[in-house]
């Protein structure tokens, strides 16, 4: 057994080791700001919009909202917003959340008929005493705030759903959008095929965006149409604070993409931020969190994708995913780049 003196010595040693680790990133050294990072190839275009705000010393909150509105409005992106693949009943239901440097947050779940769920989430944050509005209540609130009611199901997404209905027996399947894209890649002309593969411009998931503004404040946004052909009412990780997105201005911010059920189970983005608080770099914090998910069920992890993206308050960033193909985009005054995320498999 440890005697009291030894215990005190060990505790003192470990706490000084931890504070040394923390200092290694939070202490001296230049801070890269402003900076914005976001998931997948479409993050590049989204960062351009966010950067317009950040470069004029605008707030990270305004930047992330403006940034993620780009894929939300793009009908060719079938995993976010307008034109997203519907649920198994043919209904496009959207999940979004936003969080600022003060811990304020807002979220909408299973919202239909609204082009920009992220802006509704921001209004939930700013204009109600609540954090989450879901389904019909979220729609009523959006309409009361002047949002226009539209049809989010495009002919292209309707076709994909009808095709799925033929053989699916109405069974929801995890990450089926990846399979759809594999099929499209296999059946496309050689030059087109790479466009449909994971990380290619036609194969995207959720957009998660994190920004650090010129004042040193962090914010994040996450928005998606969720898993394709899910059960009606299914909500993923993207609008769940702590799972799909988490921001702590003292430490950093994180966001996720992939199979939401696995991210919720591990409260993934919160875990990434807490690991950064313990001194891990953004990349290592993402890696440890992905490992937590893989180790829980290594066999099933082989067939699913989950990726995390993180930014700390020094402007350092990193990402990690289960599968190859995860990409993320970075924009600062020195850099405009699309980076392949590292992966376990
Ligand atoms: C979800 N994380 O609804 C989201 C969607 C996604 O691969 O990223 N799909 O679970």
Image: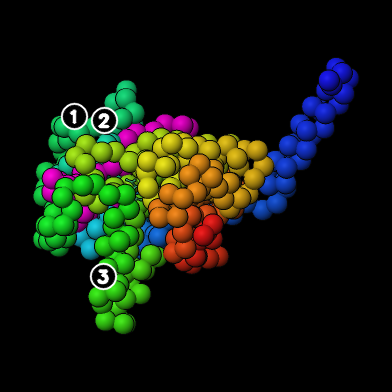
Which residue occupies 29% across, 65% down? 181
Which residue occupies 46% across, 66% down? 338
Q: How many angstroms separate mark 2 from mark 1 (CA)?
A: 6 Å
Observer-nearest residue: 153 or 31? Answer: 153
Give the colour scheme shown.
rainbow
Q: Does 269 appear above or below 133?
A: below
| Contact? badges 2 and 1 (CB < 8 Å) | yes
| Contact? badges 2 and 3 (CB < 8 Å) | no
**Label 1, on which residue?**
137
Bounds of the magenta span? 80-107
Q: Is residue 99 left or right of residue 294?
A: left
Mark 3 C-beta closer than 8 Å to ligand 1: no
Rendered location of residue 247, percent (x, y)? 48, 39
Which quadrant holds residue 146?
top left
Q: How many angstroms separate mark 2 from mark 3 (CA)?
A: 36 Å
Secondary structure beneath disc 1? Answer: helix
Residue situated furthest top in the rendering: 4
Q: Is residue 91 magenta?
A: yes
Q: Residues within 10 Å of mark 1 (few under 14, many from 20)?
A: some
**Label 2, on which residue?**
133
**Label 3, on which residue?**
184
Q: Does 39 appear above or below 249?
A: below
Which residue occupies 21% across, 47% down? 171
Rendered location of residue 340, percent (x, y)? 49, 65
Q: Residues within 10 Å of mark 3 (few under 14, many from 20)?
A: some
Q: Is residue 67 left or right of residue 139?
A: right
């Amino acid at each position: 057994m440890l005697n009291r003196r030894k215990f005190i010595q060990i505790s003192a040693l470990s706490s000084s080791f931890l504070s040394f680790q923390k200092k290694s990133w939070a202490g001296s050294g230049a801070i890269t700001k402003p900076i914005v990072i976001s998931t997948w190839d479409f993050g590049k275009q989204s960062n351009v919009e966010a950067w317009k705000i950040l470069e004029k010393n605008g707030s990270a909150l305004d930047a992330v909202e403006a940034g993620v509105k780009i894929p939300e409005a793009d009908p060719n992106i079938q995993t976010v917003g307008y034109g997203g693949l519907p649920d198994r009943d043919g209904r496009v239901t959207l999940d979004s959340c936003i969080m600022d440097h003060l811990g304020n947050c807002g979220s909408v779940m299973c919202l239909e008929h609204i082009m920009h769920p992220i802006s509704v989430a921001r209004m939930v944050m700013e204009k109600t005493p609540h954090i989450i509005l879901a389904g019909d209540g979220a729609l009523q609130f959006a309409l009361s705030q002047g949002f226009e009611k539209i049809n989010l199901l495009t002919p292209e997404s309707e076709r994909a759903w009808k095709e799925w209905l033929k053989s699916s027996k109405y069974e929801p399947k995890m990450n089926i959008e990846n399979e759809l894209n594999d099929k499209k890649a296999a059946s496309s002309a050689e030059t087109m095929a790479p466009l449909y593969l994971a990380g290619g411009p036609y194969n995207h998931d959720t957009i998660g965006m994190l920004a650090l503004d010129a004042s040193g404040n962090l914010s994040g946004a996450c928005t998606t149409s969720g898993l394709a052909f899910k059960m009606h009412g299914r909500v993923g990780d993207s609008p769940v604070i702590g799972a799909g997105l988490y921001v702590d201005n003292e430490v950093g911010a994180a966001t996720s993409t992939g199979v939401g059920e696995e991210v919720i189970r591990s409260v993934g983005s919160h875990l990434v931020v807490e690991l950064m608080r313990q001194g891990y770099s953004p990349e290592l914090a993402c890696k440890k969190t992905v490992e937590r998910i893989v180790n829980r069920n290594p066999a099933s992890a082989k067939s699913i994708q989950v990726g995390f993206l993180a930014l700390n308050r020094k402007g350092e960033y990193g990402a990690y995913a289960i599968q190859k193909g995860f990409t993320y985009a970075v924009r600062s005054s020195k850099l405009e780049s699309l980076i392949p995320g590292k992966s376990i498999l």
